[in-house]
Amino acid sequence: MGGKHCCVVGCTNPSKKTGQGINYFGFPKDAEWRSTLIAAVNRCDSGFNPDSMHICSAHFEPSCLLLHD
């Protein structure tokens, strides 16, 4: 099972490999923004590792995204 998956509980967006127009973002290195996203994801399970997980673009307002081709 390859590709990236969204770590938000209940999100069913497909893997990055399917090319469905969904973008995936890793957790940022900036401590304040990283903490904000970790709190928003609201996961406390032992399998949650923000260093290797991603959030899909469906969880951001379009105005928050700056995408480059």
Image: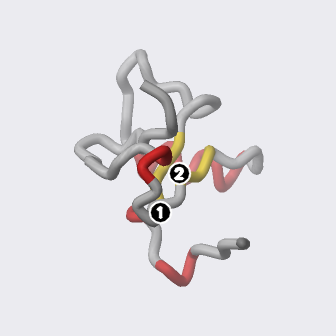
Picture quadrant of residue 66 = bottom right
> Residue 64: x percent and y percent?
57, 76
Nearer the observer, 18 or 44: 18
Q: Quadrant of the N terminus?
A: top left
Q: Residue at x 48, y 47 (%)?
A: 16
The three-letter code of the residue at mark 2 reads: Leu
Quick one: which residue is furthest to the right in this view? 30
Nearer the observer, 68 or 51: 68
Q: Is residue 49 left or right of residue 40?
A: right
Residue at numbered disc 2: 37
Q: Residue at x 69, y 48 (%)?
A: 28
Q: Quadrant of the C terminus?
A: bottom right
Secondary structure type for disc 1:
helix
Q: Image height check: is 58 above or below 25?
A: below
The reply to whether callout 1 and callout 2 are in contact (CB within 8 Å) is no
The number of numbered badges drawn on the structure is: 2
> Residue 25: x percent and y percent?
59, 52
**Dot 1, how many residues are within 10 Å of its Cα: few (below 14), some (14-19), or many (20+)?**
some
Distance (Cα) linking label 1 and label 2: 13 Å
Q: Residue at x 54, y 35 (%)?
A: 53
Residue at numbered disc 1: 57
Please report whichever mark, 1 or 2, sits nearer to the chain's N-terminal start.
2
Secondary structure type for disc 2:
helix
Q: Is residue 68 left or right of residue 18?
A: right
Q: Residue at x 45, y 61 (%)?
A: 22
